[in-house]
Image (cartoon, coloured by chain):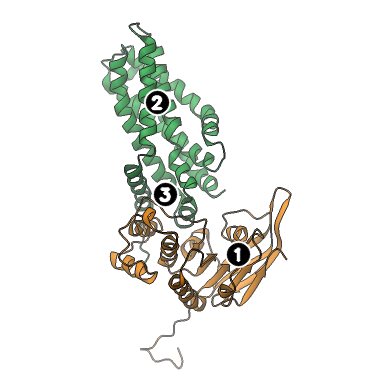
Amino acid sequence: MPVNSAGLVAKTIAVYAKDVRLEFRNRYATSVVLMFAITTLAMISFSIGQGSLAPRLLAALFWIALFFSAMAGLSAAFVREEESGTALALRLKADPTAVYLGKLLFNLTLLSLVTVVVTPLFFVMTDAATDQIGAFVVVLLLGVIGLCAATTLVGAIISKAAVKGALFSVLSFPILITLLLMLVAATARVLDGQSFGGILMELQGLFAYSVVMITASLMLFRFVWRE
Amino acid sequence: MAGVSSTHRVYIATMYRLSASELTKRFGSRKVFSGITFDVMTGEVLAIVGPNGSGKSTLLMTILGELRPSKGTVVFADDRGVLTEADVQRTTSLVSPYLNLYDSLSGEENLVFFSQVAGAQITGKEVNALLERVGLEGRGPDLVRAYSSGMKQRLKYALALMNEPQYLFLDEPTSNLDESGKKIVYDIVEEYREKAVVVIATNEQEDQRFASQFCRLGS
């Protein structure tokens, strides 16, 4: 079989397409993440009742729902490989960078899907409202990228451990706390009616966070994957 | 080149080498094996033999870099020198009970996926040829979860042969296979002993007849 110069992009797409195909056939992560997000939102809605909450509290509840949904499902991309015994074949045949990027893309797709479902529900089930849709979408986008950048690497680290769920949360918490604080602050300001100008600092911080996490993950993943 | 006409070129195959020196593996205080040293080249077959639990699979995984040795070194090299990690990945194949393929993909999809992530592009004709080689003709479109254990083992051989490996590692090579499956495996070993470094971890006497060197564990 001739080996051509298929680059990193083609290999990454191959890993991503394989994960999407497996997810489409098994619904391994989608169902868990979606159910978790919707259940959490329902709990929040019932707890609030007819009451009204401050924007900062609403923002915190929104990101808590997405954070725990991410905790429930985003480690699956690597855990599934280890549990089904396919990680060995992947390690022997695939470029580690392509594996990381493919899994990151898959997690981005999954969390974006959840966000698309959860966000309208959140606005319907609470009294949250904003006319700064553009700023809200940018915060969401940076939040999803940041969450996925951090949890993809942590998912790879914990995939070989015996107590995966607990370890995933424990390892993710210190990495994600900075991100969550910035996300809650930015979202609260947007819900309070501030436009891009009012959340510029947070947006810069969120962007820098994602760049740092993805760069660090690309540098570290080879060692995490091989060990 | 003196003595060779311009219309005839002489191709000299690259010789590949696998060496291990004083290889030792411990899990905590338990020593699995120690002082393993060998040197095999293209055209040779190394048989790793020993009773159950003696560390045959652990040694294979240590050679392949899946486990870090407690002591000692493993070197993959060719005529030009030590191979890079990418070269080792490109030239190595493994068939093992610990290596599973994707159950929710078909046999064909598995082969295409692994060729893509290896940076190659396998054609439908090549997929069919590989499946036919291992006796799975006509079963390529079926999901692997519908395969029997013997069929899964055959598919692992199709995957292993896909990159025409220079290093072929076989862990319990005939497990789960019927007589025709075993014949296919022995034909593969017969072929690759001429053009690759073959390492077989086994207890089966019949598998050991190909060996030119032995590495005995647990003795």
The residue labelled by disc 3 is A98
Which residue is painted at 29% across and 21% down in the image?
A121
Amino acid at the residue labelled 3: Ala
The residue labelled by disc 2 is A66
Q: Which chain identifier belongs to the green chain? A: A
Is tag 3's residue or tag 2's residue first in the polypeptide sequence?
2
On screen, A142 above or below A131? below
Amino acid at the residue labelled 1: Val
On screen, A153 above or below B38? above
Tell whether label 2 touches label 3 (CB within 8 Å).
Answer: no
Specify the subunit that label 2 lies on.
Answer: A
Please provide percent x and percent y for residue B120.
37, 61
**Chain B appears what colour?**
orange
The residue labelled by disc 1 is B75
Q: Are marks 2 and 1 on the same chain?
A: no
Specify the subunit that label 3 lies on.
Answer: A
Tell whether label 3 touches label 1 (CB within 8 Å).
Answer: no
Could one spot residue A202 in this view of the protein? no
